[in-house]
Image (cartoon, rainbow, N blue to C red):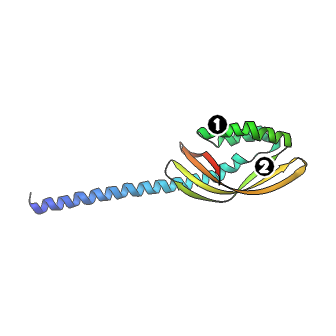
Amino acid sequence: MSKSRLVALGVVLVALALALFAGVQAHRAAAASDARADALDAAKTRVPVLLSYDKATLSGDLDRALDQTTGSFTDDYEKILTEVVEPTAQRRGISTKAAISAAGVVSGDRDEVVVLLFLTQTTTAKGDRSSVSGSRVEVTMARVGDDWKIAGLKPV
């Protein structure tokens, strides 16, 4: 084989390697972008369920709230629900409804995404006294199979 053919073969192999590398990187970037979009959508659906409950359906609402979670956050949140939310809601006849005002992705990859949510929460107590409050929370979403669940929630 001549020297010019070896050089040409080398150039072709380098070009193929670069094309393969670029393809893999593009696939990873697309997968991460898809993950961020899916996690954001899941957060916008799951967080209102997590933070909303009605005094008339409290037990079921709190069970549904826990179904939105994963990992050690499930245990931590269950403790808060059991020790604080449930007894206070029962004693004071509290219902609360959370709604997302705005949302965006802070960071993320294919398996974990952090989103920032702006919430409006309406709370009603005995006697139909209502209050509306706004807050911001940073929510960590973790991939669980083909789904996304809440793995952390931090007020900011």
Amino acid residing under circle 2:
Thr
Question: Residue at coordinates 69% horizontally, 46% vertically from top-left?
Answer: 50
Task: Name above or below for residue 91 compared with residue 130.
Answer: above
Classify mark 1: residues with Cα within 10 Å, few (<14), some (14-19) or many (20+): few
Q: As drawn, which residue projects farthest toward the left?
A: 2
| Left or right of 30, for residue 52 | right
Q: Which of 19 and 83 is in front in this view?
A: 83
Question: Residue at coordinates 62% horizontally, 56% vertically from top-left?
Answer: 116
Q: Which of 137 and 55 is in front in this view?
A: 137
Q: Nearer the viewer, residue 133 or 68?
A: 133
Q: Total label count?
A: 2
Of the numbered discs 2 and 1, the one sitting upstream in the chain is 1
Judging from the image, what secondary structure is the residue with disc 1 in?
helix
Q: Residue 111: horizontal and vertical position, in percent?
A: 51, 47
Question: Residue at coordinates 65% horizontally, 39% vertically from top-left?
Answer: 76
Task: Name above or below for residue 152 compared with residue 136.
Answer: above
Q: Quadrant of the N terminus?
A: bottom left
Question: Residue at coordinates 12% horizontally, 63% vertically from top-left?
Answer: 4
| Left or right of 34, for residue 62 | right
| Left or right of 58, for residue 31 | left
**Label 2 to label 1: alpha-carbon separation:** 22 Å
Q: Residue 49: horizontal and vertical position, in percent?
A: 70, 47
Q: As drawn, which residue projects farthest toward the front?
A: 156
Judging from the image, what secondary structure is the residue with disc 2 in?
strand
Task: Name above or below for residue 96 compared with residue 77.
Answer: below
Q: Quadrant of the C terminus?
A: bottom right
Q: Residue 8: horizontal and vertical position, in percent?
A: 17, 62
| Residue identified by numbered label 2 | 96
Residue 27 — which label?
none
Amino acid residing under circle 1:
Asp
Image quadrant in which you'd find residue 80 = top right
| Residue identified by numbered label 1 | 75
